[in-house]
Image (cartoon, grey):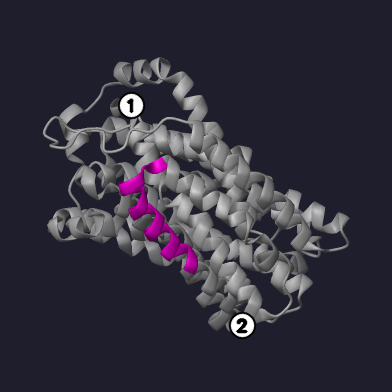
Amino acid sequence: MAWKELGNLNAKQWNAIIACFLGWTLDAFDFFILIFVFPDISQTFGVEHTSVTYAVWLTLAMRPVGAFLFGILADRFGRRPTLMLDIICYSVLGFASGFVTSLGALYFVRALFGIAMGGEWGVGASLTMETIPPSARGLISGLLQAGYPSGYLLASVVYALLFDHIGWRGMFMIGALPAVLVVFVRAGVDESPAWLERKPNAMQIVSSVTRHLPLFIFVVLLMTAFNFYSHGTQDSYPAFLKVQHKFNSQTVGTITAIASIGAILGGLVFGSISQQIGRRKAIVIASLASVLVIPLWAFSQSPAILAVGAFMMQFLVQGAWGVIPAHLNELSPPEVRGTFPGFAYQLGNFFAAANLTIQAMLADHFGGNYGISMAVICGLIAIAVAGFAGFGPQAKEVEFTGTATEGASS
């Protein structure tokens, strides 16, 4: 069983898992700070909410650039040094966001932050997946992806406890803390054994990309649906609670924290399940089940019932997402595993980057009703995720190194 595999992991493998989990957690924390405070930024600069959401769009839109640049560095020079460079970049830029003096400056800094954010997932996921045994990938995949809702949870807690005291600028300044993680990576994490075995040159990287172009296009489409799915159920939710329901910051923070706990548990559960029933089936089950939760999640009125709906929705959404680190790394050509999964993921983010703006515009169209806009996006996209995943390929437990002992299964 996948859970038993945890006891077989050595200290170096655990260090890689911890470093990449924390890297994604703290990266997501910096991103979600903006999700929580964009109504307050709009008030500071005297603009409409929609204007500030373009900063979120820029962050998401620039992530493919970072995935490509940092991915190429990881494939050419190694996962470990590239991961350290990326963590430093997004920490500095997160901190700098607290000092912007205009909306234009915010756009500029968050665009650069998007480049740094785009590099972390692909590099960290490839380092971890290439370090652990194939039989542990499902559960560790769920654990890694749980870093994203863990960042949301951390942002929720900080928002609930500190926002009234430090304001939106202080929230961003906390974003400098992830830089400390570089010390841990430098001291405790080894380079990927799969990368050390191959060390592909530039020609091998280019050749691999051209040979697998149809697969790459499919994965981009899959990840476009997935990114609409996650951002469509997360990004508008604080505004839905704060603007539509008029809840205070403590209530908003508490409900989103409960949702994040559901997301973390969902990633672990469905990641583990995918090791037993396959990556595709686990994704299809989670995504279709989430459609049934929409009424509770989007149309309830009391904080308690909304919290239950948010927990269930994120359990299923991030349950489907929990399969993705393993699924994409297993599908990836070995010469470009640092670039392929992350770049495809972040291109999907690019095509889904307008989600918050679309939902805000839909909400305005329906008289400020974010519930309707979220329900429409979630319902349509959940079905699309199930369709792409269910009819697409998988390569469960494919070998990453010549010394692996477990083969692939279809």
Task: Using the image as rendered, state which of residue 105 and residue 235 is in the foreground.
Answer: 235
Residue 236 spot, x, y in % from top left: 68, 60
Residue 205 sits above or below residue 30 on the image: above
Residue 2 sits above or below residue 82 on the image: below
Which residue: 55% across, 50% down? 287
Residue 392 sits above or below residue 116 on the image: above
Residue 64 appears anywhere in the view: no
Which residue: 72% across, 56% down? 375
Q: What secondary structure is found at the residue carrying circle 1?
A: loop
Q: Earlier in the sequence, mark 1 or mark 2?
A: 2
Which residue: 35% across, 19% down? 208
Rendered-image quadrant of the C terminus: top left
Q: Which mark is residue 250?
A: 2
Please report the bounds of the magenta region as a residue range: 262-279
Task: Using the image as rendered, state which of residue 314 and residue 200 is in the foreground.
Answer: 314
Rendered-image quadrant of the N terminus: bottom left
Q: Are marks 1 and 2 in contact (CB under 8 Å)?
A: no
Please, what is the dominant secondary structure of the magenta stretch? helix
What residue type is disc 1 on?
Answer: Pro
Seen in the image, is 116 located left or right of residue 221?
A: left
* Residue 153 inside the magenta-drawn segment: no
- The residue singled out by tag 1 in the image is 333
Residue 198 spot, x, y in % from top left: 19, 27
Quarter holding residue 312: bottom right
How many neighbours does mark 2 have within 10 angstroms: few (below 14), some (14-19), or many (20 or more)?
A: some
Which residue: 58% across, 74% down? 308
